[in-house]
Amino acid sequence: MEAYTQSYGKVSPRIYTYNMKQLELIQKVLKVKLKECQSSNILAYGWDAKKRSLIVVFKNYATYAYLHRSKEEFDELDQAKSKGTWVNANLVKPKAEFKRYVFSGIK
């Protein structure tokens, strides 16, 4: 598995492995499949069809479920060239309703 290339260079395999273990834990707890992405702020995102929530995991592992979202919005995010710009414009700035998850042991 190749580590993502960021503007500051390659992520070390050790950090990449740590990120993947944390994402596996988050997916297991939330019961949602997350998609990794190349973004300066977002580590991964996913769609919870049962709860109609768009899940966003930021690089600092802050995890948010944006509530009352549509599958079409998830598809827009999935197709967005810049995931961070899309999340900021469509979820953060409009102050979309959310639930924040805090996982002990994840930094």
Image: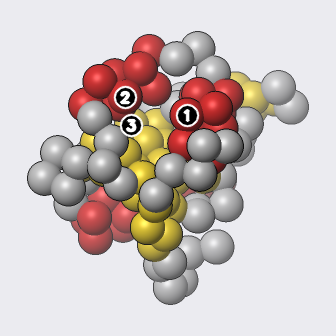
Disc ID at residue 90: 1
Which mark is in front, 3 or 1? 1
Q: Identify the image quadrant of residue 30.
A: bottom left
Amino acid at pointer 1: Asn
Of 58 and 87, which appears nearest the observer? 87
Q: Is residue 58 left or right of residue 11?
A: left
Which residue is disc 2 drawn over? 73
Identify the residue shown where x is 43% and y is 67%.
99
Q: CA distance from mark 3 to mark 1?
A: 19 Å
Q: Is residue 54 visible?
A: yes
Q: CA distance from mark 2 to mark 1?
A: 9 Å
Identify the residue shown where x is 50% and y is 78%.
102
Q: CA distance from mark 2 to mark 3?
A: 15 Å
Q: Are marks 2 and 3 in contact (CB under 8 Å)?
A: no
Which mark is in front, 2 or 3? 2
Q: Earlier in the sequence, mark 2 or mark 3?
A: 3
Q: Is residue 87 left or right of residue 12?
A: left
Q: Is residue 24 left or right of residue 16?
A: left
| Label 2 crowd (10 A; few <14 / some 14-19 / many >=20) | some
Identify the residue shown where x is 75% and y is 29%.
6
Q: Are marks 3 and 1 in contact (CB under 8 Å)?
A: no
